[in-house]
Amino acid sequence: MIEIPSSALLAPSLAAEVDFFSIGTNDLTQYTLAIDRGHPELSAQADGLHPAVLRLIQMTVAAAHSQGKWVGVCGELASDAMAIPVLVGLGVDELSVSARQIPLVKARLREFDFADAQASAQLALSQATSDAVRDVLEAH
């Protein structure tokens, strides 16, 4: 499980030791942004589409793929309709979602091709904040 920034940063070393990576985006977001997702006032700012979180996902995917391993994403981000093309564009191999979210995710996956997903990922990575990411993706 990649749930803390240090494990994402060490992904090149860890990839040689594992069969796959599963990125827990809820914890990864909380620890990357230092925002307690249970805090009543701050939790709304804990957005997995923050470029810092996306860069850690990108690093993890690159490390895993360089060793022939796959990467899954679980947590709220995996079923966030705006995030799905970004995750695919970053090279994520699997989205783990609750059973009731499967139709939404499948429908969203049918709406774009891989080139579009890669463009969305690059747009997202080039932004400074999660709000900017959401704005640019919405306009795209």
Image (tube, rainbow, N blue to C red):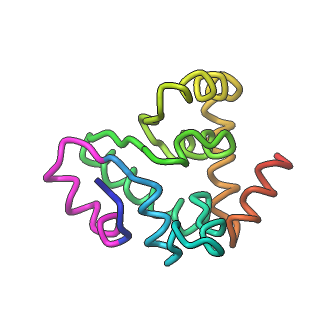
Image: 128 above or below 87: below
In the rendered image, residue 133 lying in the magenta stretch gets the answer no
Give the residues drawn in magenta, as a range.
Answer: 6-21
User: In front: 129, or 97?
Assistant: 97
Horizontal side, residue 6 vs residue 75: left or right: left
Towards the viewer: 96 or 62: 96
Which residue, as the protein is rendered here, is positioned at the far bottom? 34
For the point 29% across and 66% down, the residue is 7
- In the rendered view, does 107 fall on the left or right side of 89? right
Q: Position of residue 102 (x, y in %)?
A: 54, 25
Residue 16 vs 6, above or below: the answer is above
Q: Residue furthest front?
A: 40
Q: Quadrant of residue 14?
A: bottom left
Left or right of 20: which side holds 52?
right
Residue 1 percent coordinates (x, y): 28, 53
Q: Does 69 sit above or below residue 10?
A: above
Residue 74 x, y percent position in the rendering: 43, 44
In front of the other: 100 or 82: 100
Q: Is residue 96 above or below residue 21?
A: above
The quadrant in which residue 46 appears is: bottom right
Residue at the (42%, 34%) spot, across then down = 94
Q: Is residue 13 magenta?
A: yes
Image quadrant in which you'd find residue 80: top right
Total labels drawn: 0
Residue at 36% across, 43% down: 71
66 relative position to 121: left or right: left
Whole-percent x, y for residue 65 in the image = 33, 45
Looking at this view, name the residue that lies furthest to the right. Answer: 139
